[in-house]
Amino acid sequence: MFDTMTLTKLLGGFCGAFLVFLLGKFAAETIYHGGGGHGDAHAQGYVIEISSGDDNAVAEEGPSIEELLASADIGKGERVFNKCKACHKLEKGANSTGPYLYGVVGRPVDSAEGYTYSGALEKVADVWTPEHLNGFLTNPGGYAPGTTMGFSGLGKAEDRANVIAFLDSLDD
């Protein structure tokens, strides 16, 4: 069934395909890694400049939370609060995944009736002042490590001020 000529053709075809594969690999390495020796293989194409400023320097901040609260818009705060509705309710005593937020501004931390807290908040604050709420809403996990709140935070200071003003307006 197989004679010598057939086996030679098969072996020649395999060797030819392997040769094309090796040449393609060589060409690809030359194109993508440069034609230099192996010492150049991991050299950067360009240097990324980073600032060498003082790590302890305070970043330039915008207006304080007091200034933002003075000009806060309660209507906008109610719209931003829609992000919070998945886990929090506004009715007193109506806990959900998170504690109810009625009267949260000025309320002692970890004090919503019927809600079991993780204990992480007690380590960073005693009372929910606008300053503490602002810090917590910026980055909950960074502000109170170990908190069970999975929300990533509100990036805009104006949004945080509007939500705090909205929550403060609920209980007069």
Image (cartoon, rainbow, N blue to C red):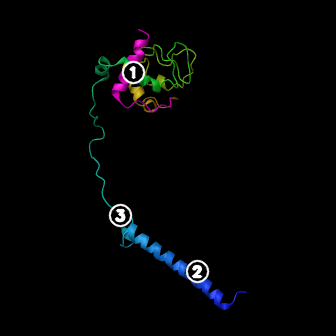
**Which label number is shown at residue 77?**
1
Mark whose residue sits in front, 3 or 2: 2
Task: Report the residue marked by disc 2.
Answer: 14
Amino acid at pointer 3: Ala
**Residue 56 relative to residue 122: left or right:** left
Pick the residue in front: 6 or 63: 6
Residue under the image location 58 percent in, 16 percent down: 114
Does the segment drawn in magenta span residue 16? no
In the rendered image, residue 168 lying in the magenta stretch gets the answer yes
- Seen in the image, is 62 located left or right of residue 104? left
**Which kind of residue does numbered mark 2 sit on?**
Phe
> Could you say where residue 128 lies in the image, as x and y percent from the top left?
42, 18
> In terms of secondary structure, where does tag 2 sit?
helix
The answer, for residue 8, to whether it is visible in the render is: yes
Vertical placement of residue 80 versus 2, above or below: above
Instruction: Tell me if 2 is positioned left or right of 68 in this view.
Output: right
In the displayed orientation, state which residue is furthest to the bottom. 4
